[in-house]
Image: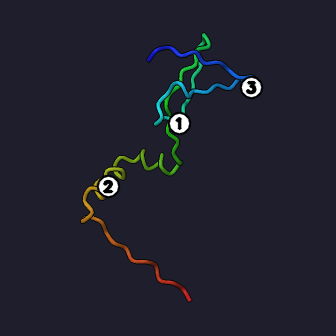
C-alpha cells in the first residue's frame, strides 16, 4: 500500500476511508513517543464471551457439539406454572 495523506478537520477528526480494510470497523490505537499513531484491528466481545474463550475445555466441547450434532442432548422445555 502506498502512503496516503490524511488531514484532520476542525474538530481534529480524521476519515480513514482511504485506508484500512472494509472488514475492520474498530481499532485500538497506540501512540508512540514520537507521536506516531499505530492502529490495530479490534474485536469487541461481551464479558461472557471472554470468559467462555478463556475456558479451553468448554470451547472444545462447544466445537465438538457443533461438528457432531448427534452428540447433542435435547432438553425439554420447563413446565409452565398455573
Q: Which residue is drawn at 56% across and 28% down?
A: 17
As measured in the structure, the alpha-carbon distance from the residue carrying label 3 to the one carrying label 1 is 21 Å
Instruction: Name the residue carrying label 3.
Output: 11
Left or right for 19, reference 6: left
Image coordinates for residue 10, horizontal then vertical, percent: 75, 22
How far apart in space, not on screen, are marks 1 and 2 (Cα)? 30 Å
Please tell me how crowded label 3 is: few (under 14), some (14-19), or many (20+) other residues with Cα within 10 Å: few
Badge 3 marks a residue whose secondary structure is: loop
Q: Name the residue under label 1.
A: 25
The residue at the point 43 percent across, 77 percent down is: 77
Q: Where is residue 18 in the image (x, y as percent from the top left)?
A: 53, 25
On the image, numbered disc 2 is attached to which residue? 61
Which mark sits nearer the N-terminus, 3 or 1? Answer: 3
Determine which quarter of the picture holds residue 12.
top right
Task: Decide which of tag 3 and tag 2 comes sooner along the chain.
Answer: 3
Q: What element carries label 1?
A: loop
Q: Quadrant of residue 26?
A: top right
* Residue 63 drawn above or below residue 28: below
Q: Residue at x 51, y 84 (%)?
A: 80
Amino acid at each position: 500500500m502506498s502512503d496516503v495523506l490524511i488531514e484532520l478537520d476542525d474538530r481534529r477528526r480524521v476519515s480513514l476511508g482511504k485506508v484500512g480494510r472494509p472488514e475492520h470497523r474498530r481499532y485500538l490505537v497506540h501512540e508512540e513517543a514520537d507521536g506516531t499513531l499505530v492502529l490495530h484491528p479490534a474485536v469487541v466481545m461481551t464479558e461472557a464471551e471472554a470468559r467462555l474463550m478463556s475456558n479451553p475445555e468448554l470451547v472444545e466441547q462447544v466445537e465438538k457439539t457443533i461438528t457432531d450434532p448427534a452428540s447433542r442432548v435435547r432438553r425439554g422445555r420447563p413446565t409452565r406454572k398455573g
